[in-house]
Amino acid sequence: MNPGRIAELSRRGVVAVSGPDAVTFLDNLFTSDVPAALGGAAYGALLSPQGKILFDFIAVNDGNRILIDLPRIQVADFVKRLGFYRLRAKVEIADISDDHIAVAAWGSDTAPILDGVVVADPRLAALGWRAIVPAGADMAPDYEEATEAEYDAHRIALGVPEGGIDFAFGDTFPHDADMDQLAGINFTKGCYIGQEVVSRMEHRGTARRRFVIAASSAPLPATGTPVTANDKPIGTLGSHTGSAAVALVRLDRAKEAMDAHTPIIAAGTPLTLTLPPWAKFGWPAPATASED
């Protein structure tokens, strides 16, 4: 049996939120159910009032505090934003990125043995495990060490996008990023910033852009390359490895092109688009062209 793989995620930072009001404070801000994180982990986002993703993250329970794993480049802005909303809440917010690292592990049903908090990845069982450990901690002896790029290959093969790499913060709705499909939104919890927009998209079924899997037999162009059909834009290529990529596309335009056998390309490279195996959404039925 092949051992699992484990990788430090150097591009990720860690923020700790503690204090008697920590769970309630975060629950009033985040799209996910923060109390649920007390039993493990929650994937979620902090949105703008217009319902677009400003930060996405994985929050885990570390006993007396909530640890938040997010892009390291966003940590300072995230801490500042939480401080803006704190008001009289009894919470402490700290950047602990210099002392803690985020870790991903996959390829084994057994959780890695680490000196830190280890949880099942809350987005998708196939992603494996997520951990936050002290900097310099030994990696799990029962896992084979891997690189961040190898983790990305695993993530991309499953069709899972990552904020700041595959979509721009401040310009993307949670439904666009498949957060509703990856347990990133609780549709029954109380109010949070941007909730009205997210709920409206869910109940009206107006999400038209989605991340799908893109594949090609030719080398793929750079992340951010427009995806077109008949010289008309239908989406954007995300991160890729080998012949596989994720792509954010207009489902209706992509389906129209596929039905018409119109080549779908990115910078001259032909693409084949498929839905992620976990997706609950499908290709739309043929319809008249919709507006932007």
Image (tube, rainbow, N blue to C red):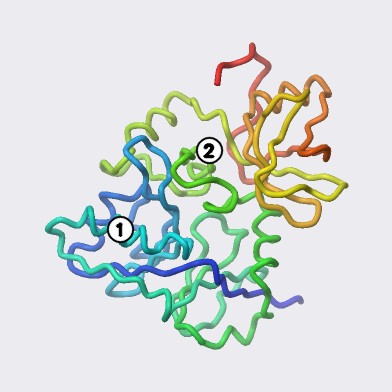
Camera-nearest residue between 230 and 202: 230
Residue 78 lies left or right of residue 101; in this view the side is: left
Q: Is residue 229 above or below residue 102?
A: above
Residue topped by disc 1: 35
Label of residue 264 in the image: none
Mark found first going from the N terminus, 2 or 1: 1
Q: Is residue 226 above or below residue 93?
A: above
Residue topped by disc 2: 176
Q: Position of residue 258 (x, y in %)?
A: 78, 26
Camera-nearest residue between 1 and 47: 47
Q: Is residue 190 above or below residue 4?
A: above
Q: Nearer the viewer, mark 2 or mark 1?
A: 2
Residue at (72, 21) in percent of width and height: 256
Secondary structure at numbered mark 1: helix
The kind of residue on which mark 1 rests is Pro
Q: Residues within 10 Å of mark 2 (few under 14, many from 20)?
A: many
Q: Label 2 vs label 1: CA separation? A: 25 Å
Residue at (57, 32) in percent of width and height: 209
Residue 6, by quadrant, is bottom right
Q: Position of residue 26 (x, y in %)?
A: 28, 56
Residue 144 lies left or right of residue 135; in this view the side is: right
Q: Residues within 10 Å of mark 1 (few under 14, many from 20)?
A: some
